[in-house]
Amino acid sequence: MTVRWRIFVTVLVLVAALSSCKDDSTEMLPLDEFAEAQNEQFHVHTRSCNLDAKMESLMRDESYRKQHEEKFTKVNAALSDIKTRTSCSNPTIVPMAIHFQGISNPDAACLTALAQSQVDILNKDFTGTNTDILNWTSQAASFFPGASNGEACLQFCLADTNHPNGYGLSNGAPAVTVNKTNGDSDANWSGYINIFVRANTGVLGYSPLGGSGNGDGVVVDATAFGTGSGCGSVSPNAPFNLGRTLTHELGHYLLLDHIWGNGCNVDDLVADTPDQQQEYYGCPSQGASSCGSNDMHMSYMDYSNDACMYMFSAGQTARMEAYISSSLGNVTGNAANVCSTSGTTGGSTGGTTGGTGGGTTGGGTTVTCETPSAVSVANITSTSAELSWTAEPNASQYRIRYRESGTSTWSISNTTNTTEVLQNLMEATTYQYQVRTQCPAGWTAYTSMATFTTDTAVSTCAAPGSATVTNLSPNSVHVTWAAIPQAIRYRIRFRELGTSAFTVFSPTNPSRNLTNLKAGTTYQYQLRTRCPSGWTTWNSMSTFTTEGTTTAANVLTVKLTLDNYGSETTWELVNENGNVIEDDGPFQDGQAGTLKVKTFEAEEGCYTLYIDDSYGDGICCNYGEGSLELLLNGVVIGESDGQFGYYDYIDFCITANGFKMGDRKRDAKKAQAQEKHPPRVANH
């Protein structure tokens, strides 16, 4: 294959359209139904990756360019060895260090735990042991005959010994630094894959295409690192809150390109990933296709939401393994020096460092310090278990490691106590565990392998109780109900009283706006819950009645003239309570000059009409003469000439005597947006 490197001038920003209403009788694939709910909840968020800008900067160096081209020759030569491997009995240990930057009032313990949880996610994603790989094996794989998911023979280790000096890390502590580094490289950390986490990067992350292990690394925005509630300013935000941004960027570091390559005629250099026209955002439906074949948008190397990317192809993992063996020997060769858990086989990491305990002090007195004894487990619940052991004289701390039985990746924690409560376990699951002691002479061996099994959780998942319905306008209401424990999502169906056909929505939050209703009309509605065990029955039928018809004097019309990039344009009308009354968009591209009109009734009150452009360059005038008019009873009461940055808005009030205008403000960020975004190319 020809070695290639490309520079994208811009990143396409697409907004997934809200899924349409469907009749309850229409059957959908569960993954498609999940995708619909994801797109509905997170339709304003898109993934971004600054790979091309990073590579543009690096390739200006002629020596780097030459080394970069050599990487492709080396990886192709190494691929044959990877493809002939039939099993993974001795995974390659890859040491990592994680550096948090610019953190105010840092909680070091929380950040360390978050770092370890992110490494655990990487190990599951790269080895194909993530729980949502079932989405591939049970459903998505049928769209790709002959293709299989990848299971890399790798284990990422958060380094814990022989740290570089000057970073305040003690031997045995994980390689997690806080406010000790700057930028995206630190030569003192050569021999590691470095992860730099900081806020306000402008993108979710970036990496070189093929890292060098010379202190370089991957940058991840603080809003997309790890999972859970986060630690202060380092807080993963939906829909990028499952740790998959680092999985994506680490793929780049290990020489994987974006799965779409550069369109139908340019490959990503991986044989089992079908050609793809362009990136996908949100949660695409199964069977989406381009270039004459189904698109593998569930790959970690696309731009889908975290919950909707869940696999590498076998070709992608083989390529990454080949790159590690051919170009990152300086990293893997450092594993035995910096990872105390390296050196064993079959994924059972945990070799000893500094002997097996015992030893002498400087005065020649024998120090008694052994592997913990009388280790036991108690207080087992569906999600936790308490380990305890006998105290060892002269122990400085203890290390506990545990994993699901049958898996290869350990969770590790250190404590100075003789008890440890293991949290966030899976119900009805068998776990293996071991404990060892840090003595003056080093770490002892681990205790013999032992197991425990968590309890089965008592389900509290049920159908919702009564709901509260609030009228927003004569044509819309807001329905809310109490959240149900363990609920995956909900379903609400409603119909006009006296009719038989229901309109159905599947929100993930316990609320929903119902729009396009008839004024002064009674509706029936019901709710049910999707629990881990399946759908509950519908709750009791309830009713609500919309407000009466407003007078003809309160008819609003929004007239929007599109520019050439309708996919960036949306508008919404918000009342004084912050509720969205009406909205529209995004629209299709290539419709410059097309007029989009929406007419509806509104009651007396104060409103704000927003028009937004997700790219930040307005809708006039470089790519079409876009504009907006707001009419009350056919009379123009407000307008936007389209010359703004990210937004423009109009405040107004409808009164018994007509209307009055309020504030008018357009986005002052237009110049800034133009600096941030280079000129758009024709295939934007």
Image (tube, grey):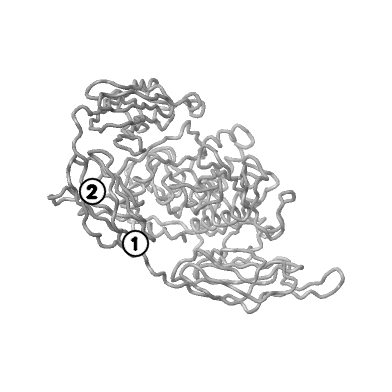
Q: Which residue reaches farthest front?
A: 656
Left or right of 178: which side holds 596? left
Q: Which tag, 2 or 1, sits closer to the chain's start? A: 2
Amino acid type indicated by mark 1: Cys
Residue at point 28% right, 48% down? 469
x 57%, y 62%: residue:
91
Residue at (61, 52) in percent of width and height: 107
- Residue 638, disc: none
Image quadrant holding the C terminus, namely: top left
Residue 548 point in image, percent of width and height = 19, 38
Instruction: Examine the rendered structure and indicate whether residue 654 appears above or below residue 373.
Output: above
Q: Amino acid at mark 2?
A: Lys
Residue visible at 45% across and 55% down? 314
Residue closest to the eye, 263 or 530: 530
Per the image, the residue denoted by label 1 is 531
Which of the 4 image quarters holds residue 644? top left
From the top left corner, tell me how far across and down residue 496 is, in percent: 16, 47
Is residue 671 placed above or below 45 in the rendered structure? above
Is 679 on the left-hand or right-hand side of 596?
right
Residue tagged by mark 2?
22
Percent of width and height locating residue 251? 51, 48
Instruction: Give how far apart the Cα atoms at labels 2 and 1 are.
Output: 21 Å
- Observer-side mark, 2 or 1, equals 1
Residue 343 in view here: yes
Mark 1: secondary structure: strand
Q: Looking at the picture, does residue 82 appear above or below residue 670?
A: below
Query: For numbered disc 2, what is the local secondary structure?
Result: loop
Instruction: Where is residue 513? Give x, y as percent.
Output: 29, 44
